[in-house]
Image (cartoon, rainbow, N blue to C red):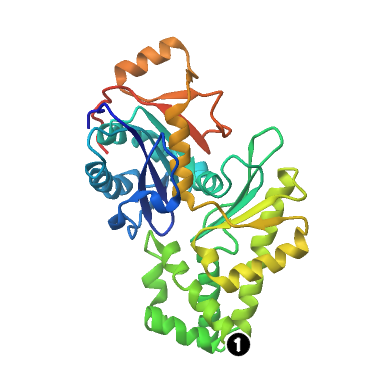
Amino acid sequence: MEQAAGECWVVGVDVGGSGLRVGAAPAGRPFSPTGVRTVGSAAAARVSASAGGQDARALLDQLLPALDALVAGLPDGAGIGAVAVGATGMALLGRDLAARLPGPLARATGARRLVLAGDAVTAYVGALGTAAGVVVAGGTGLVAIGRRPGGSWCRADGWGQLLGDCGGGAWLGRAGLEAALRAQDGRNGGSPVLLLAAERHYGPVAGLPAALQPRPDRAALLAEFAPAVVAAAEEGCPVAAGLLRRAGEEIAATATAAATAAGQAEPRLALTGGLFRLDPLRRATLDALALRLPGARPGRPDGPPLLGALRLAVAASAVVSTSAVSPSAVATSAVSGAPVSTAAPDFPWPLDPPLLTVLDLPDRPADDGP
């Protein structure tokens, strides 16, 4: 797409464990989460992961058609100034995305600047904007993020399904399925209620290992069972109630760790993400927070992580940047079509690659494919 003269728009992309969301908004006018143009067909897409993190090819297969639809629906003469992508695992396993997204996204949108961010950052910016505080982002996974007095980010958990994300959707769903299988075997800690729920959702539980373990999206499949655990707790199942209480305690412990690292004893605190739409789990988390972090000031988030991606894109489209690399490297980049890492002193959030990176894109990126 060639950049057209006219109003500047920005694009935000939120890549989570259970889906992909894409939105656009005007860069020069105030907008609210409800005023963002989105592509609904992308909302149900799941993106797989590889050894390098999120699979760039799988993401681009979903994202590029969504971008085409979004760009086609913009007002006549509108151009895209910046694209911001927030992705699960960017901070730890984002090498593939950082290497392979810039060229295709520049060609698809004509944008001159690209922001790559961890999903924790887009959750924070969507929930609190530039304000200081702590945000807990809960969905398939779970991470807490705060800002230190000097401005740098500090994270707690977000280690992924295998090593952490304690209290998140996949964690709770897996714990519920373990209780179901304990009931199947007649072992201690089993729940006949959760066994019935598992059979309704997945079919005979003997087939669960073969159904879940080979799947690249198994974390999302496990998270699908979290609402059943919450429902069982509400219906009086003591095992499910114990899992719900423990999930709240784990989430509160993660939030407290982020607040402590940020040096905030009384932080403004937001719980964001689909996990906290489960009201009993939200209440369990707030109850645990009242004990662990009594000075916390919970409040409603401004909006979802997609809003955070759009806020990052708006800021990136407006800042006056200076190259963070030498002039010779810039010249080499211009020839090769590679993006140039940007130092932006006036960017309102701390740049901390790979957690948050701003890239200047070349005019004619090389056709390196997805």
- Image check: 182 left or right of 224? right
Secondary structure of the residue carrying numbered label 1: loop
Quarter of the figure that contains the N terminus: top left
Using the image as rendered, state which of residue 272 and residue 186 is in the foreground.
Answer: 272
**Measured along the vertical axis of the image, is residue 156 above or below residue 206?**
above
In which quadrant of the rendered view does residue 280 lie? bottom right
- Image check: 151 left or right of 71? right
Using the image as rendered, state which of residue 199 and residue 356 is in the foreground.
Answer: 356
- Image check: 247 left or right of 106? right
Q: Give, as a three-letter code, the residue at label 1.
A: Gly
**Measured along the vertical axis of the image, is residue 315 above or below residue 33?**
above
Residue 113 appears at what percent x and percent y?
Answer: 39, 29
- The residue positioned 46% from the left and 47% from the top of the image is 307
Quarter of the figure that contains the C terminus: top left
Kindly tell me whether residue 267 is visible in this rendering: yes
Q: Please state the total of marks drawn on the protein image.
A: 1
Using the image as rendered, state which of residue 222 and residue 309 is in the foreground.
Answer: 309
Using the image as rendered, state which of residue 240 and residue 75 is in the foreground.
Answer: 75
Residue 354 appears at what percent x and percent y?
Answer: 51, 36
Badge 1: residue crowd in 10 Å (few <14, some 14–19, many ≥20):
few
Residue 172 appears at what percent x and percent y?
Answer: 55, 69
Kindly tell me whether residue 50 is visible in this rendering: no
Q: Which residue is mark 1?
A: 236
